[in-house]
Image (cartoon, rainbow, N blue to C red):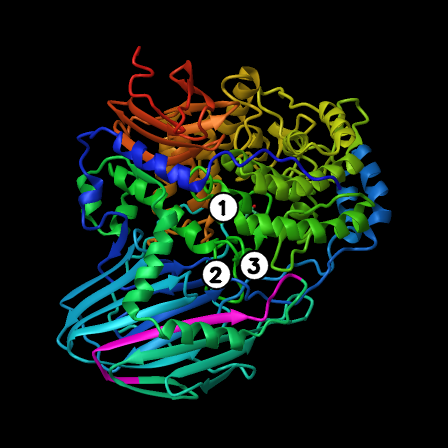
Amino acid sequence: MKPIAFPKQPISRRDVLRAGAVGLSALPSLGLPAATGSKYHNSLWYRQPASRWEEALPLGNGRLGAMVFGRLGQERLQLNEDTLWAGAPYTPDNPESLAALPQVRQLIVDGKYKEASDLAGAKMMAKPLWQMPYGSLGDLLLTFDASHEPTHYERRLDLDTATTTTHYRNPHGDFSREAFSSAPDQVIVLQLVARSGRIAFDLAYRGPRAVESASPDYSGSATSLVSSQATDWSMAEPVGTRRADTTMVEDGRDALLITGRNEAGPNGQSGLTYAMRIKVVSDGSISVGSSGIEVGNASRVTLLIAAATSFVDYGDVSGDPIATVRQQSERAARKSFEALKHDHIRDYRALFGRMTLDLGRSAAADRPTDARIASAESARDPELDALYFQYARYLLISSSRPGSQPANLQGIWNEGTNPPWGSKYTVNINTEMNYWPADPAGLERCVEPLLRMVEDLSMTGAKTAKAMYGARGWVVHHNTDLWRAAAPIDGTWSGLWPCGGAWLCNSLWDHYDYCRDAKVLERIYPLLKGASEFFLDTLIEDPNGRGLVTSPSLSPENGHPFGVTLCAGPAMDRQIIRDLFAHTIEAGRLAGLDAALMEQIARARLRIAPDRIGKNGQLQEWLEDWDGLAADQHHRHVSHLYAVYPSGQINVRDTPELLKAARTSLIQRGDLATGWGTAWRLCLWARMGEGDHAYAVLKSLIGPQRTYPNMFDAHPPFQIDGNFGGATGIMEMLVQSWGGEIILLPALPTAWPAGQIRGMRARGDVTIDMSWRRAKLASLVLRGKPGSELRLRYRGETRIVTLDSQGLHKANDLFSLR
Ligand code: FUC
């Protein structure tokens, strides 16, 4: 292979930081009520402990997660490690599939959709039919010997430091706890301090177990998720009996070592071991035994919690978790609590500090977070909108770091061994949505785990492509797991959809388009190429002459009038593949590679069946005009609107007819859906330039029917994608970048008349600081590659600006004509 001539990396991090220092000081003061002055700025806080899991506060370093309950009589830390999934390496491809493929396709051509679905269900699905679920590491339960109703109580998650604190006073003394999950030191740290009184507790371990969770609601919750129960200050949970394969031993005078096995998957195999080591540092007495740790008569106790599994990669489970946790916890113990905390905050802030958002402040911001969520739909509380945004950034930093697994359906936070939808990676919307905010919100480093997962999938998915379709390249259907399974699962209704890998590739292209990092291009080019090759080999000619289509496929999870989902050429597939082919061609051009193949892809792209407007004026979800006849007129997925968002194929500038049809479809679907469905609608209304409509949808997302007291998004049950999609929608109202332009305040709602952002990113490696006042642009600072030309749009006018030799442009009067 000849060397790839990638473009030079446009601008170094140091350049950006240097330019940033100039750009920030260029922002005028807005006279906004200072959101940043408040004690609780960027904090979630409560006046009572968590009674349920969805009230506990999440910590994470990308890999190690903890849910902190802040209880008095018994503190509970529910723990996760992001490789502790069920099962063992496996290959689920079904060898019978290839022979059935032509028959299934013919049945679809013949309009025998039910028969096609039955045959595909019998012959084309993965073995086993279910993928492996993500698990839990269990709980640490610290039971205190003295508990009493407090005279003062507060717990809090500070997003500026990624730290939880619990503080209370009662007749026994004045106590505080502080916890964080450190990325530099790879341990969870919990410190307990008695300012007066003494600390004494028993620490016990409750292993992974199945828990009850609300059953999935496919149309989104219609009732408030805020609990109205009275606070139980002495709440404590039983430890239960330990599983036979779990061991707990003293590991040195002041450390407890726990080991166990992962759950067996649906194929009966379990291939992982895990280890957790808890090291205690205290001025009190410490006694470690096979039932846990006893700490007595202390004024200060620090627990250093390390956890790991034997997972190395999707095909290798030969790691040594015991050696890992010993090393990590002992290394952390050589540092003081203050040093651990300092290093944690410095590391975290390098990411979190890259973007700020101020939307103004009202008196509602002084109330505890659960009360604010409870009244979010009616109260004017713009700071809650900004908090929701920053919380999503916090969650992404905490669940997706270079080297970790990508954020799954619950990020990394999962209570039981039986999570909803396996807490896996659903790639017909959910995983992609998780990463929508990453680049615009200055968190491009958090995309690394996704890129690595797609690299894995290009290997496993190549086997699936060959075995099932006899095709080159690689394919992923609607789900994957830790083991990177790529075959269709669950049943044909949702499973037999071949565009999961293609959509992931489009997300990775977007990542490149924002950062323009040559190293990213180098890594994604082979992925895009392989995904395109799969479709060159499997797209078929529509017998009615409408162009190239996928078959069999489906419009994610929406049944058509024939009572099944299976069909040929749903709109979303055509839109996704159109993008995939365009991105592959562009990547190939930049790399100077595979010219003949790129031409072939370009020719195929022109023959993909175009989008169609149906008899009700809607954008057709399917190749046939079935929309008005589909059973669920308000289906949560809005797959055919992929072209509007996240793609820009249909947009307000270039395609007015199609946009009108897309709008008709969106109105028909309605605004109320699951958490993620609501967030997607929010992004769509923002892309359509309708800020007040978008804002109304945002209010319903942040309200108590879509958001739990700990601000986790509710499908319901908890699913993290809505948090990420919601944050993206907030940004899309303020700045968009598509079609070669940066569009300023494209959908500003009347609820945010003044505000400012710093550090937001746009496509083309551009960083934006911007403020607005009385709903008008007040200042603008752009940073990027020196000399680059940027096309800006504001209220229908366009301007071209050229960044100076410092890569800077300050444009306070750029659009002063208005
Ligand atoms: C898709 C959605 C569901 C849910 C699941 C995890 O299947 O249709 O609503 O979000 O993923």
How much space separates mark 3 and mark 2, taking CA atoms? 18 Å
Mark 3 lies on a secondary structure that is: helix
Which is nearer the N-term, disc 3 or disc 2? Answer: 2
Amino acid type at circle 2 is Arg
Q: Considering the whole magenta stretch, tell me its main secondary structure.
A: strand
Nearest to the eye among marks 1 and 3: give it. Answer: 1
- In the picture, measured across the screen, residue 579 lies left or right of residue 747, that is right
Which residue matches tag 2?
Answer: 63
Q: Position of residue 41 (x, y in %)?
A: 24, 47
Q: Is residue 529 above or below residue 249?
A: above
Residue 434 numbered tag: 1
Nearest to the eye among marks 3 and 2: give it. Answer: 2
Which is nearer the N-term, disc 1 or disc 2? Answer: 2
Beta carbon at label 2 within 8 Å of ligand 1: no
- Asked whether the residues under the numbered discs 1 and 2 touch, taking CB atoms below 8 Å apart as contact, a structural biologist would say no
Which residue matches tag 3?
Answer: 422
How much space separates mark 1 and mark 2, taking CA atoms? 16 Å
- Asked whether the residues under the numbered discs 3 and 2 touch, taking CB atoms below 8 Å apart as contact, a structural biologist would say no
Whether residue 564 is visible here, answered yes or no, is no
Between 491 and 39, the one nearer to me in the picture: 39
Q: Residues within 10 Å of mark 3 (few under 14, many from 20)?
A: many
- In the picture, measured across the screen, residue 571 lies left or right of residue 391, that is right
- In this view, which residue lies farthest toward the front? 805
